[in-house]
Amino acid sequence: MNARQRYAALSRSDPLDRLPCVPIVGNTAARVLGCAVSDLRADGRRLAEAQIAAYRRFGYDGIRVFTDLYVLAEAMGATVRVPRDETAYLDTPAIAEAAAIDRLRPADPRRDGLLPAHLEAAARCLDAVGSEVPVTAALTGPFTTASFLIGADTLVRLMIRRPEAVHRLCALALDSALALAEAMMDLGCAPSLTDPMGSSSVISPRQFATFARPPLERLIRAIKARGHGVTLHICGKTSRIWGDMVAAGADCLSIDNEADLAEAKAAVGGQVRLMGNVPPSEVMLKGTPRDVRRYVRLCVAQAHDNPRGYVVASGCSLPTETPFINIDAMMDAVTEIGWPPRLDASQDGAAAPPEA
Amino acid sequence: MDERTKKLHRDLSDAVVNLDEDLAATAATAVVAENRDAYQAVEGGLAHGMDRAGKLFEEDEYFVPELLLAADAMYVGLGILRPHIRIEGTGRGKVVIGVVAGDTHDIGKNLVRIILETKGFEVVDLGRDVPPAAFVDKAKEIGADIIALSTLMTTTMPGMAEVIEILTAQGIRDRFRVMIGGAPISAAFAKRIGADGYAANATEAGELAVRLAADAAAAGQAA
């Protein structure tokens, strides 16, 4: 089966050869292609080549065009540092204070920043392998983009001191996200949403419901209106906002390893597909192939019977230097487990997670 | 301690927990105007309040925004009290302090720095998001007695172990005492990575540093 056939079978509860598996490969793709991480960001052709090469190398079930979280905020005026061969990071927010919010304009995906390059990358991936594997493009959620536009510290102070300013800023970030989402969908590419600043490791569930959820809901509605399913990833702790993530309209929640898959299944598994949550750093980057196999088995044991389906995945994007043998081990483990899952632990010892 | 002093300490603590900069300013100004001990007001008031806020954070009652605003109130109080703090002693030793790489939360670290300075330590603050090797390099450069590592995030805890691994690899582990702290850190974690001490809050960190410096001095004499 190819990836598209696998997802179709999963949705219809038809027989599968194995569960879909997505080690979320971001800048590790540069290692597969043999170029620098910093070569990918501004070069749509290279970014596509790297993502396609990584997909072909590992044979996973989803390409997600992603280099870093800042592309949209950058297109609205934030500045980003791009160290040679490392993941880019935010240098300076677009504005320093609430008074400047009205100076911001929504991004134009055909023109601003690196949005055209990322759209080009998505188009090239679709063209090359889109018939066999879903190609999504990462889209940073409005609340998170808002934090990059004004700076996280300023944003969270405003949340408590001047909530109306935060709503205005999120509305601008939403306009940009909507425009980018439409441009992605014009290519036939589904946006894949990530809103890490909404995590309960950062803001409270109530703050999430007040500030992050409403624009997310608008964005998801627009994507679903064009017939695409929406995967929503939020890093860190999320158990107290799963209900809001589902109510915002997500079809699939991508769960970090700081949250519990079995708990997610019990709470929202009847409403959404789940993916996760092999620890990207402790297991995928630093563990052995044996650790990876053991953890995959644990995840499958927890979530294979999720009513709305389960996709084996890393808890978050993989660190750039994740060893290839660990990504291979993840794919191999899922193949060995097969479908229906064979979960005896004879091949990897005890099913307990390695000590963190 | 008289009732009035207790009341002012309570106000300072409440100001921090309730994210109330105005109350922090009023209470701190009263401490100074009434010639009450400024250091005790930091320890029994502001640090006490930060500790309460930290506990609420651990209990998932407070989140990063509340911690930041609690810190804002704390800094307002500190700004008023700090010029009036009498340094307890001098020459207690040298400390390199910082927040390990991957984490940019530095509220707890800043409070510990001020308490250490008050206790008579010479403190070099490397700031936040500090790579493990930078702690070691700076400690060697200034001949530090103590390396103090802070983090608020579980994801950056391995960076603490890495500092100790680097010291060991360079054969200089016994030249420095390493202390660690921060919301996700426990005494068990400190023991596991081979740190010399763990403090649950800023006040304890001050006491721990004094103890570690005394140990180091005793060991130095014995050697």
Image (spheres, coloured by chain):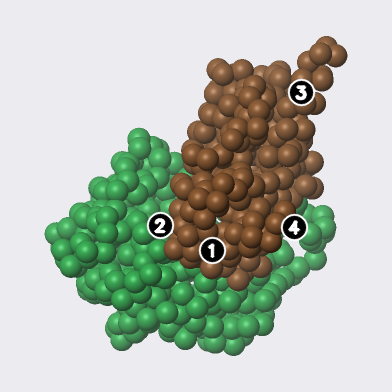
Q: Alpha-carbon neighbours of circle 1 within 10 Å: few (<14), some, or many (≥20)?
A: many
**Mark closer to the observer (4, 2):** 2
How many angstroms separate mark 1 from mark 3 (CA)? 38 Å
Chain letter belonging to callout 2: A
Residue B216: mark: 3
How many angstroms separate mark 2 from mark 3 (CA)? 39 Å
Chain letter belonging to callout 3: B
**Mark closer to the observer (3, 4):** 3
Q: Position of residue A85 (x, y in %)?
A: 38, 37
User: Which quadrant of the view contains residue B3?
Assistant: bottom right
Q: Which residue is mark 2?
A: A153
Amino acid marked by disc 2: Asp
Q: Which residue is mark 4?
A: A353
Chain that the image shows in green: A
On the same chain, marks 4 and 2? The answer is yes
How many angstroms separate mark 4 from mark 1 (CA)? 43 Å
Identify which residue is drawn at 56% across, 71% down: A238
Q: Position of residue A197 (x, y in %)?
A: 44, 64
Q: Which residue is mark 1?
A: B15
What hue represents chain B? brown
Q: Position of residue A104 (x, y in %)?
A: 18, 64
User: Which quadrant of the view contains residue A126?
Assistant: bottom left
